[in-house]
Image (cartoon, rainbow, N blue to C red):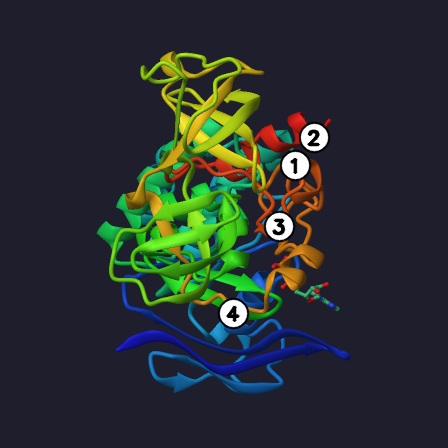
Amino acid sequence: MALLELAGTTVRYGQRTALDSVDLSVAEREIVCVLGPSGSGKSTLLRAVAGLTPVAGGAVRLAGRDQAGVPAHRRGVGLMFQDHQLFPQRDVGGNIAFGLRVRGVPRREAERRVAELLDLVGLPGAQRRPVGSLSGGEQQRVALARALAPRPRLLMLDEPFGQLDRGLRERLLVELRQLFRSLGTTVLAVTHDQGEAFALADRMVVMREGRIAQAGSPLEVWRRPADEFVAGFLGFRNVAWATVAEGVADTPWGPVPLPGGEAAGRRLLLVRPSGVRTAGAGDGEDGGGEGAGGEGLWATVRARTFRGDHVLLLLAPESGPALEAACPAEAAPAEGRRVRVSFDPAEVVLLPGAQDAGPARIAAHPARPAATGRAGSPGSPEPAAGPADFGGAETVGNAEGTGKIPGPGAGRASGGAGRQAAG
Ligand code: ADP
């Protein structure tokens, strides 16, 4: 049975609908991450489940029981918000043990549990430190330990790792997943960081304007974004309308081969950056090809961004909008080089949820997630290099992608090859 069920759950703040008839169920022991740009309703969803925000319509059920009228402290859910409010007059141990003491856990056992949790969150031996002496990140770790201490049946985390440095965040995510597994904790976590969601979640829920845009396993969502909004949010920018017939898509970049079995018609097509191949004029990969002609699509390398195990290229094709290509660092062509572009059908996806409203709508309203307020993140309000820069009319999406599932923090760490070239 589902531990948590939302059925048509709606929350309004005055005239504003922050949660719009959301249906969601979370199974026992499942880890679900709710992902979306700022203002999409993620925190409101948690607050509605916790009983901190009144529900205007629909139901919230925990273990099958409707929670209407059940106060927050009777719901048996643990909560950790980004603005974790620790008790300033208590030390670290006192903060973590608080929930255990009110539940009558014997002192010895509580102490053992506090020590375990402090080890887990990377603050071993910090029991007697005053919370006022902790950095923001350390306070966050204590807040996490405090939320975990009573072993709640549903643990809800709201942007729990926002202030932690990347190394600690990655370690914590791996450890937390193991810990949640071993405790059998059911988790509903909110983040705007896709890397965090990919690392933690059994299932991801992508929100847009108070509704669920897509729900699925991290791999499903990554492999097959439902529509241009989700694709853009994940950072894919090689998206264009195409006419599909007999295994080939006619796109602004020319013919793009498809994996096979696609229905004919007007469809929105995504090519992952790893599926955009570049080669020079001589047949060796990326051999240069200055001024060379020949068959296929030619493009100029506008920018290169080093990504550790690959280089992300921003290409200005001779026809069609800008393309991003991921290629091995040692084979990456230099800026200004002309390269021949080909497409790997295995990395081409037709977006299932996209409605064909024609190129005019897309050109006028690129599918751009609402602002997150963080430059360079998916959903950044800044326009990336796109149709306007390279004369294309049909791209959607606004951020960069790599063709690989990003690590934690990748959503924020993007440097913006598109913006470099646009500048
Ligand atoms: P997220 O967590 O995804 O950033 P929120 O759930 O905080 O989004 O907000 C969803 C929408 O509801 C936003 O438009 C936000 O401005 C609005 N909102 C959130 N809290 C309140 C509130 N207390 N009063 C009025 N509007 C609110």
> Type of residue at label 1?
Phe
- Choose mark 2 or mark 1, whichever is in front: 1
* Mark 2–mark 1 CB contact (< 8 Å): no
Vertical arrangement, residue 39 with respect to residue 396, above or below = below
Q: Earlier in the sequence, mark 2 or mark 3?
A: 3
* Mark 4–mark 1 CB contact (< 8 Å): no
Label 4 belongs to which residue? 355
The quarter of the picture where residue 14 lies is: bottom right
Taking the spot 25% from the left edge, 56% from the top edge, the residue there is 260
Crowd band around label 1 with a 10 angstrom C-alpha radius: few (<14), some (14–19), many (20+): some
> Type of residue at label 4?
Gln
Closer to the camera in the image, 46 or 383: 383
Does residue 2 show up? yes
- Choose mark 2 or mark 3, whichever is in front: 2
- Residue 251 x %, y %: 48, 50
* Mark 3–mark 1 CB contact (< 8 Å): no
Label 2 belongs to which residue? 422
Does residue 104 show up? no
Query: What's the CA distance linking mark 3 and mark 1?
Result: 49 Å
Query: What's the CA distance linking mark 2 and mark 3?
Result: 42 Å
Label 3 belongs to which residue? 85
Query: What's the CA distance linking mark 4 and mark 3?
Result: 44 Å
In this rendering, position of residue 3 left or right of residue 53: left
Q: Secondary structure at mark 2?
A: helix
Vertical arrangement, residue 391 with respect to residue 155, above or below = above
Query: What's the CA distance linking mark 2 and mark 1?
Result: 9 Å
Crowd band around label 4 with a 10 angstrom C-alpha radius: few (<14), some (14–19), many (20+): few
Label 1 belongs to which residue? 390
> Type of residue at label 3?
Gln
